[in-house]
Image (cartoon, helix red, strand yellow):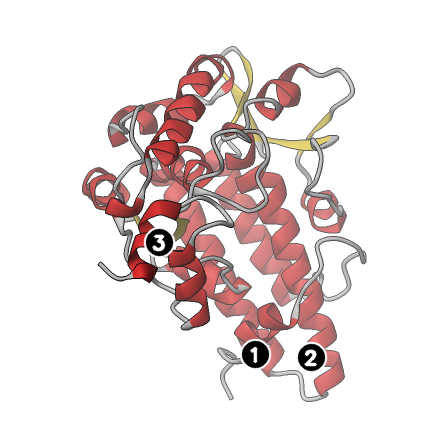
Amino acid sequence: MDRTSIQTAQAGLTTTESPFIEQARREGQFYIDQPYELYSEENHEAWRRLYSRMGPRWQRYANEHFLAGMDALRLDPNRVPRLADVNRFLGPLTGFEAKAVSGYVPAFVFFDCLRNRRFPTTITVRRSDKLDYLPEPDIFHDIAGHVPMHTDKHFAETLVRFGECAHTAADLVAGIRDPETRVHCLTSIIRAMARFFWFTIEFGLMCGKDGLKVYGSGLLSSYGEITHAIEAPEVQRFPIQLEWAINQSFEIDHYQPLLFIVESFDHLFGLVDELESWMKQGKLNNVSPGEPGVNEEDLKSFLEHSPV
């Protein structure tokens, strides 16, 4: 084993500290393998502690589809999961698979992955001494937060439908001849899609048999915010309205003060249909400015897939 390999193995696969990930990014590798042997004991300890403390809160606040998904995936509470094992249980249920990536995924590529039932999955783990600090998504957020929901057929179809909206957007902006207008409209559409995704897939609430439950992955993977989302009196919780969600900016560095409620995943699927309809009518071309920002890579990813 050469010096680089030794250093990589010793560093493990810790978020923002992994030589393996840094090298993959330098070499332009987007899809990667999961080098399971690189996980350190600290990485496994971080997963164990994250999983252990979330268990009671999932039982209290998570929706029933998530809990069923956790049972179906049979995750090991003590070891970082192998994506191959996750996919062995996930695939037969909905056709989805967790696919390892080296980091940031441009917007169109991400949505297109959903359309093709692939979920870009981070393989690094947050530091064991900073369980509540997450500078970027990690494998606990992706596998324990997102993927259990992918075992539900209705939710999975909603993700696929959302991915199809990205293709609709690319087709629509391709028909705009003026470059400046094209970029303006595309920026607004991407911002609207990102806001919708944030307030539903990442931070959504839904009606349950015994009150409000969490289905958003950002809440399902957060020890503090899952409780805050349901219990805190200062959080505003409203039945979702599409025009509110797509025009509402958000910030990612603190607990969310505003959350939206869906009635069911059939309701959510219908909202995605409505989102695409509004897109075709031009109603997403001028949503309110503000967060999230849309960077050049996101724009480029859509424009490169626009038919000429």
For the residues labelled 1 and 2, say whether their Cβ atoms are less than 8 Å apart: yes
Whole-percent x, y for residue 163 in the image? 46, 58
Marks 1 and 2, the one that precedes in the sequence: 2
Marks 3 and 2, the one that precedes in the sequence: 3
For the residues labelled 3 and 2, say whether their Cβ atoms are less than 8 Å apart: no
* Residue 261 horizontal side relative to residue 149, left or right: right
Q: Secondary structure at mark 1?
A: helix
Residue named by callout 2: 182
Q: CA distance from mark 1 to mark 2?
A: 9 Å
Marks 1 and 3, the one that precedes in the sequence: 3
Badge 3 density bin: few <14, some 14–19, many ≥20, Cα 10 Å: some
* Residue 286 horizontal side relative to residue 206, left or right: right
Q: CA distance from mark 3 to mark 2?
A: 44 Å
183 up-or-down from 187: above or below: below
Q: Residue at x 74, y 73 (%)?
A: 184
Q: Residue at x 27, y 27 (%)?
A: 76
* Residue 83 horizontal side relative to residue 244, left or right: left
Whole-percent x, y for residue 110 in the image? 47, 60
Which numbered dot is residue 26?
A: none
Which numbered dot is residue 303?
A: 1
Amino acid type of the residue tagged 1 in the rendering: Leu
228 up-or-down from 240: above or below: above
Residue named by callout 3: 8
Whole-percent x, y for residue 172 in the image? 59, 75
Q: In which quadrant is the N terminus drawn?
A: bottom left
Q: Secondary structure at mark 2?
A: helix
Amino acid type of the residue tagged 3 in the rendering: Thr
Q: Quadrant of residue 90?
A: top left
Q: CA distance from mark 1 to mark 3?
A: 37 Å
